[in-house]
């Protein structure tokens, strides 16, 4: 099984746009890429990776994250008006920092 290397993408980019690539070809000559075999099952960490990406996007949008002692992570929108929030799982009142 083989895959497309950065050199392949670079060549396709040059042919399509008629522009040279940013990386010189000498930097790409020894590139080898191992391609994993296809799988019907997502990786075990897929759900966590997806959640982490969502958290990053929310954090950049101004969301606040509050960890409750019961294990729940609360995601508070930037326009939330009070400085405390009640955990929907255990009822504990938590400060928003």
Image (tube, rainbow, N blue to C red):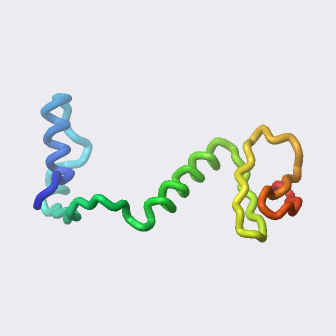
Q: Nearer the viewer, residue 14 or 1?
A: 1
Q: Is residue 26 above or below residue 80?
A: below
What is the total number of numbered labels drawn onto the structure image?
0
Q: Nearer the viewer, residue 74 or 14?
A: 74
Residue 88 occupies quadrant: bottom right
**In percent of the image, x 21 and y 51: which residue is there?**
6
Q: Is residue 55 above or below residue 32?
A: above
Q: Nearer the viewer, residue 58 or 90?
A: 90
Figure quadrant of the N terminus: bottom left
Figure quadrant of the C terminus: bottom right
Q: Is residue 46 left or right of residue 69?
A: left
What is the x, y in percent for residue 67?
A: 74, 63
What is the x, y in percent for residue 35?
A: 20, 62
What is the x, y in percent for residue 75?
A: 70, 51
Q: Is residue 94 above or below residue 62?
A: below
**In percent of the image, x 86 and y 58: which residue is there?**
95
What is the x, y in percent for residue 41?
A: 33, 61
**In percent of the image, x 16 and y 50: which residue is there?**
7
Q: Is residue 95 left or right of residue 3?
A: right
Q: Is residue 34 left or right of residue 85?
A: left
Residue 21 occupies quadrant: top left
**In percent of the image, x 18 and y 53: which residue is there?**
5
């Amino acid at each position: 099984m083989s895959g497309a290397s950065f050199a392949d993408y670079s060549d396709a980019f040059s042919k399509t746009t008629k522009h040279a690539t940013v990386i010189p070809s000498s930097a790409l000559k020894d590139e080898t890429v191992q391609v994993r075999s296809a799988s019907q099952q997502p990786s075990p960490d897929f759900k966590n990776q997806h959640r982490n990406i969502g958290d990053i996007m929310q954090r950049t949008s101004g969301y606040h994250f509050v960890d409750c002692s019961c294990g729940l992570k609360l995601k508070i929108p930037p326009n939330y008006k009070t400085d405390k929030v009640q955990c929907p799982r255990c009822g504990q009142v938590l400060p928003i920092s």
